[in-house]
Amino acid sequence: MNVHELPMILFTILAQMSVGAFVVLGIIQIVAARRFGSAAIDKVTDPALFAIGPVMVLGLIVSMFHMNDLTNTLNVLRHFDSSWLTREIVFGSAFAGLGFVFAFLQWKKWGSTRQRQALALVTAAVGLMLVTSMSMIYYSLITVPAWHTLATPAQFFTTTFLLGALAVGAALMGTVMWRIKVAARAGTAAADTEGVVDPDSRKLLTSILKGIGIAAVVLLGVEFIIIALHISNLAGGGAVAGESVAVFSGGWFIARLVLVFLGAGLLSVFVYRYASSSKMARPLAILATSAFALVLAGEFIGRSQFYGSMFRIGM
Amino acid sequence: MEKLGFSFDQTLCNGCKACSIACKDKHDLPVGITWRRVAEYAGGTWQQDGDTFVPNVFSYFTSMSCNHCEDPICVKVCPTTAMHVGEDGIVSIDEDKCVGCRYCEWACPYSAPQFNPGTGHMSKCDMCADYRAEGEDPACVAACPSRALGWGPIDDLRAKHGTLAGVEPLPDPALTRPRLVIIPHRDAQMTGHGTGAIVNPEEL
């Protein structure tokens, strides 16, 4: 497995996961608002929202290790009109900044709900621009056949939504478990899901987890189609592409497929199946977290192989 | 101002690599950085001659550095504008701006920008700007014992030698439009139609 590009592997995955989680939380707001009301949704999803910021900032910090002269760091903002790398950094910083402002307003409940929603919409748009710029960094290299293909943006966006959705699922169940623990420590009699999560929130959680389970299975299908098309495309694409395609084979490649299948396929089906049983908080939390962890590991291997498939035309 | 470029005559090169060493010496390049490199491209088949199969082999050399492209992908992708094009078409790196992200290294199909771990910056050929300012030839051109290398305004070079730049193992010139003219070896194979392979990859 190629770990020479470790800073880039971690940065792209963490940033995509952050954007994905932010957008998924937004979709939850839009879809569920009519039935549950904004305030009820905020109560369930705010802790997950607050977790995105640190992940994104961690990603940005890790990405600094890709540079070899930090004293010139600010120069990377100079070439916005031509370099996708500059655009990536601008949109990445903007997403982190806007996300921070939004999370802060959400925490303090400053401004009207509409105003905060407008800000969230802008933040999500900037986040999607970030993922676009990220994929264009690689897609625009016409000298690297394994990257100069639609598979690059398709895979980046699939990773974004797959990891984002599963991260939200894990974060929401983690919050429930944490609340149960706090209640138990305080000696509350009903230290279970019934006791710490009111019926409305429980209904909402059930719907969210079911939605995430379905989304994960669909995105798993999309990802496997992308992988198959990418490999067949490279296999017929000349000598340099042929060197790249060899990377997508062997133990690590199979491990990636198995991990993503187990997490986004098998476990997500179980998440969907058991989402509605109120007595199942602990197993459900373990399921949601495991699904997320397996897919995260699979995507890590996948991204490492993406960098490993870098073979360039020429000499 | 006239744009500059290199010419290279494959029919004259015997693969001595004096150009490569002259460049390394002139710029005092550390181990691992070689702005000008010489690729040996070789291949062959068997040919039936009556009842006998005889080998039909070929080999030729290509000396390669930065080609100061008309459409330089390194300049396009650089986030800092450290990689820039001068008035004379020469592509050079401004070390005061470079962050050493190595994106240009990924992009260039001639491996022209090379990373210097000592400085944390990229480094590359500037066609010996200091020598040219004093009216001298670039070090590689001056060192070539068989006079296979040339330099000058690319329009003049093209008028004299033609416009060929797509010879194996070089990339398709449509990618970056190099200011380079190749005078092809008699066995030279056009880019994309090669049957041979680079036999000294460790030197490139």
Image (cartoon, rainbow, N blue to C red):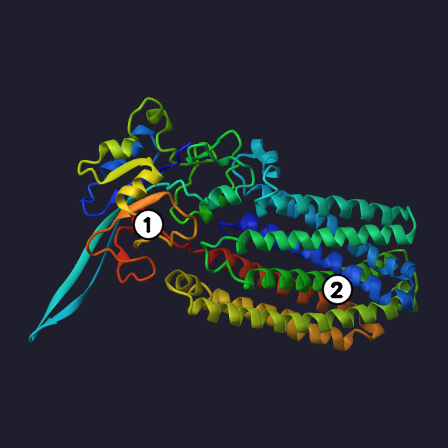
Residue sitting at the far top: B134
Mark seen at residue A105: none
- What residue is shown with label 2? A169
Relative side of B2 to A142, left or right: left
Q: Residue at x 45, y 68 (%)?
A: A249
Q: Residue at x 46, y 45 (%)?
A: B71
Residue A250 rendering spot, x and y as whole percentages: 45, 68
Q: Residue at x 62, y 51 (%)?
A: A133
Looking at the image, is A194 positioned above or below residue A136? Answer: below
Looking at the image, is B76 positioned above or below residue A42? Answer: above
Which of A131 and A179 lies nearest the eye of the viewer? Answer: A131
The chain to which mark 2 is attached is A
Residue sitting at the far left: B51
- What residue is shown with label 1? B165
Q: How many marks?
A: 2
Secondary structure of the residue carrying tag 2 is helix
Looking at the image, is A251 positioned above or below residue A300? Answer: below
For the N terminus of chain B, which image quadrant?
top left
Residue A49 rendering spot, x and y as whole percentages: 79, 54
Q: Amino acid at mark 2?
A: Gly
Q: Is residue B35 visible?
A: no
> Could you confirm whether marks 2 and 1 are on the same chain?
no
